[in-house]
Image: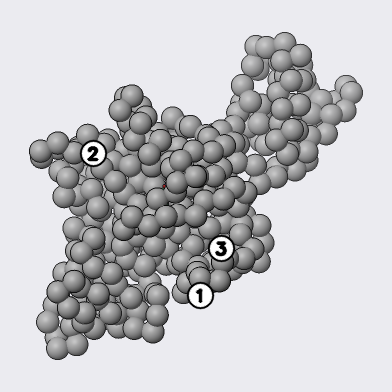
Amino acid sequence: MKTKILTILKEQPGFVSGQALCGWLGVSRTAVWKVIKQLEEEGYVIEAVRNKGYRLVEAADVMTEAEIGSRLCTERMGRSLVYLPQTDSTNIYARKLAQKGYPDGTLVVAESQTAGKGRRGRNWSSPAGSSIYMSLLLRPDIPPYCASMITLVAGMAVSQAVGEMTGLPARIKWPNDVVVNGRKICGILTEMSTEMESIHYIVTGIGINVNQQDFPEEIMATATSLRIEAAKKISRSALIACTMAWFEVYYDQFLKTKDLSLLKAGYETMLANMGQEVLVLDPDGTYKGICRGIDEAGRLLVDTLEGEPKRVLSGEVSVRGIYGYV
Ligand code: BTN
């Protein structure tokens, strides 16, 4: 009911009478009043005028199930939504939901994480108040070797949503980071549960630096936030909803072919290193080359400086620009 009232208040430019809300929702005036009070406690500013009703004056950067739900325009992604004030890791939580049978597209969002996971066993610092920590549970009918492609699909969704909401040039640092002006604003961690040749489920975790105003010295040179780059506060709930909308579009394209052939051209327009010199940190030996894009399996195409074409597999290597992180 909270989501419905919030959605109605957002859609109406003026006052909505308490009576109309009761009629639409089939509940008592007291029930409506209680929800309005809850919304105010969460940070919304709602004007209440006798004989006129309620009017939403300001929607703060509230990140709750109702706020995210009221902004979603997807069919499946995020329609099953779990919001947690705190959890160990949204990826771990989503895995537990997967085992309980939650559907494809289930989204877990947390305000903070006590054991946020980064790639290569690293920790993902996850304090409350300014970031997005979310994980999508997916149940695609694809072979296990295709799972890593979902990271690229998620990267496209974040890059597109950030661009749309902030006007910033968000680019993908293949395979799992999104960067703005050469610094990281998002990391993606895809994990899966498989058996022989089939996938039980996939969990794609996305961490986005949204409203931080500063960073610890160790990562200041490589990390930034949308607020720092855009010089304005960004609504986390709106960004989550927008990312889900784009994810659904790209994911459906991906599912048609079970590879990236329909997304390759779009992906390459978002690729940070496209046409530039990169350093490939391959365990078998580091080499320099020119980044030529991706293939339909999501491998990075690199022509070595000696002219040999290589297909770089994610997970095997790390790719840098020759002058630093991007
Ligand atoms: C990386 O760049 O190393 C990937 C970071 C992924 C972080 C996100 S935050 C939400 C989800 N839950 C986790 O524990 N990790 C991912």
Report whether the residue tagged 1 is closer than 8 Å to ligand 1: no
Residue under label 3, please give it: 225
Which label's residue is closer to the chain start, 2 or 3? Answer: 2
Q: Nearer the viewer, residue 292 or 318?
A: 318
The C terminus lies in which quarter of the figure?
A: bottom left
* Identity, as a three-letter code, of the amino acid under mark 3: Ser
* Residue 161 visible here: no
Secondary structure under the numbered disc 2 in the rendered image: strand
Measured in 3D between alpha carbons, the distance from the residue under mark 2 to the one under mark 3, in whole angstroms, is 32 Å
The correct choice, above or below, for 229 with respect to 158 in the image is below
* Identity, as a three-letter code, of the amino acid under mark 2: Ser
**Rendered residue at 67%/12% (across/down):** 27
Report whether the residue tagged 3 is closer than 8 Å to ligand 1: no
Where on the picture, by quarter, is residue 99?
top left
Would you say 233 lies left or right of 256 here? Answer: right
Which label's residue is closer to the chain start, 1 or 2? Answer: 2
Residue under label 1, please give it: 221
Q: Nearer the viewer, residue 122 or 176?
A: 122
Secondary structure under the numbered disc 1 in the rendered image: loop
* Identity, as a three-letter code, of the amino acid under mark 1: Ala
Taking the view exactly as shown, the residue that stands out farthest to the right is 50
**Rendered residue at 38%/57% (across/down):** 122
* Residue 32 visible here: yes
Residue under label 2, please give it: 193
The correct choice, above or below, for 227 with respect to 110 in the image is below
The N terminus lies in which quarter of the figure?
A: top right
Q: Nearer the viewer, residue 126 or 74?
A: 126
How packed mark 3 is, by other alpha carbons closer than 10 Å (few <14, some 14-19, many 20 or more), is many
Measured in 3D between alpha carbons, the distance from the residue under mark 1 to the one under mark 3, in whole angstroms, is 12 Å
- The disc at residue 253 is none
